[in-house]
Amino acid sequence: MHATMMNYPLTTNHLIARAAKLFGEVEIVSQAPDRSLIRHTYADLHARSRALAHGLLTAGLQPGDRVATLMWNHHAHMEVYFGVPMAGGVYHTLNLRLSPEDLAHIVSDAGDRYLVIDDVLLPLLAKFGGRPPFERIFVVRWTDQLVPEGLHEYEGLIGAGAPADWTPPPANENDPIGMCYTSGTTGRPKGVVYSHRATVLHSLASALPDSLDLSVRDSLCPVVPMFHVNAWGLPFTATMVGAKQVHPGPHLQPDALLDLWAKERVNVSAGVPTIWMGIMKLVAQDPGKWQLQPNLRMVVGGSAAPESMIAAMDELGMQVIHAWGMTETTPLGSVARLQPKHAQLPAAEQLKIRAKQGIAPPFVEMRVVDDQGREVAWDGEKIGELQVRGPWVAAGYHGGVEAADKWTEDGWFRTGDVVTIDADGYMQITDRTKDLVKSGGEWISSVALENALMGHADVAEAAVVAVPHPKWTERPIAVVVAKPGKQLDEAALTAYLAERFEKWWLPDGYVVREEIPRGATGKFLKRQLRDELVSWFDDKPG
């Protein structure tokens, strides 16, 4: 017997065509550099994406050619998301916060042919040194400045639009559509190439009620940049369901975001914890200033959100939704949502569940493996490295880089996260393998200490790193930032932690800083801190 179902290709072309047909009047709002709001619709997005695809093919784009972007979140970046794959090309989002060396390496490694860039970001081209390596550069104009000689206007590329009877090249669901590079915190950034099929399936899973619960009823503002794992795939998911999209452009300051959310009735947003900390501070200072949507959902990823932050947001009428993922997982790998059986638990227990990274969506499988390569039970206690597999999990890096290190022989991706998974399937990250503190043969979780410290009334941020010790191999040192107007007392911090951890877990010292260095995606640069503190114990008695 054979199945009698149609072999219908899963492509992003379908997502944008459907949005134009069913939700053509729904808005896509872009905040310009001068903070004016530019309004388009899904009908516009479809027409302009078709025009871009037609223009690129006319300019000589060949199947698989890479089109790089240096852009903030706005309508033109979305047009690249849909228009480049429609033409058979591969968009490549460049992280404008990376170092010049990493940017030059990434562009060379990807083999980018064209570049689309915001005019306000033209100075970044100097980062590449000498002549930019792109065959053609198309400039999205937001200001009155003229396009430099030798570059081309983006609107000129789109031209008069695609002819009404023009048909895009046929697309296979396994064709590549886009690529992102890892953040490079553990070495050179590595390219991950996404397919139509993976992106569509990821969008379907992301929209589920027990995932991010997106629908046509929502107004979404992705604060996470579109150059960071496709803004966590949210532009695709929102397009699939017809949700209104509100893009902040370069204005990511808390007050600018709150103004935008209030004006455009945003009820869903997404970003890293540092963004939400700034939002939380301003709303707490002046609760009545912004008329925000009730129970505004705030998806948090990139690093763990402390229980204290989740609880504080609840009190302000904003719901934190914890999620986890990586560049290699497109990125959604898990979401922490309460289930009906949790309704009778005390509030403190519910909070602990919400502070976990959550359960995997359909088709993503997880397992935990100890340092001997043995799979461990899901009991919420045993730790090990998280390994995952699924239809939107990468099977290798662009060019085959380091594949032997990151994928097991039986096809699972090694995340490098040290986790527990409880009997209900809720995963919780205890650390990165490289960030665990090995003291006297036992492991200490830097993440657990950090989250506890950030629950202290005087601490704004905290990073805990492993520092070499002559007797214990390694010991934890905490780097802390005080809240405005507060003074940090080391003895008080130690006493606070002593109520929560065994004595041997407590940091051997504290370093008070005005800020903690961060990488291009907002994560703490622990490698830099370890290098700075490597000689901490050299002149101290053991």
Image (spheres, rainbow, N blue to C red):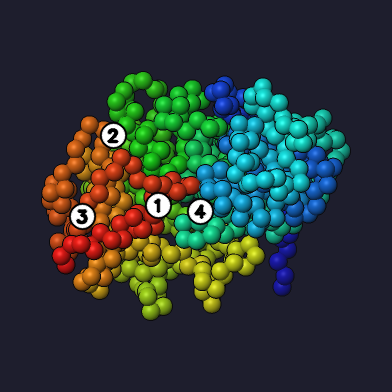
* SS at badge 3: strand
> For the N terminus, which image quadrant?
bottom right
Which numbered disc, 2 or 3, marks the residue closer to the eye? 3
Which numbered disc, 3 or 4, marks the residue closer to the eye? 3
Residue where numbered disc 3 is placed: 509
| Contact (Cβ within 8 Å) of mark 3 with mark 4 | no
User: Which dot marks residue 483?
Assistant: none
Distance, label 1 to label 3, CA atoms, is 19 Å
**Badge 3 density bin: few <14, some 14–19, many ≥20, Cα 10 Å:** few
Residue where numbered disc 2 is placed: 315
Distance, label 4 to label 1, CA atoms, is 11 Å
Mark earlier in primary sequence (4, 1): 4
Mark earlier in primary sequence (2, 3): 2
Residue at image position (45%, 42%) is: 271
Which numbered disc, 2 or 4, marks the residue closer to the eye? 4
Frontmost residue, 367 versus 122: 122
Residue where numbered disc 4 is placed: 183
Residue 36 percent coordinates (x, y): 57, 21
Distance, label 2 to label 3, CA atoms, is 33 Å
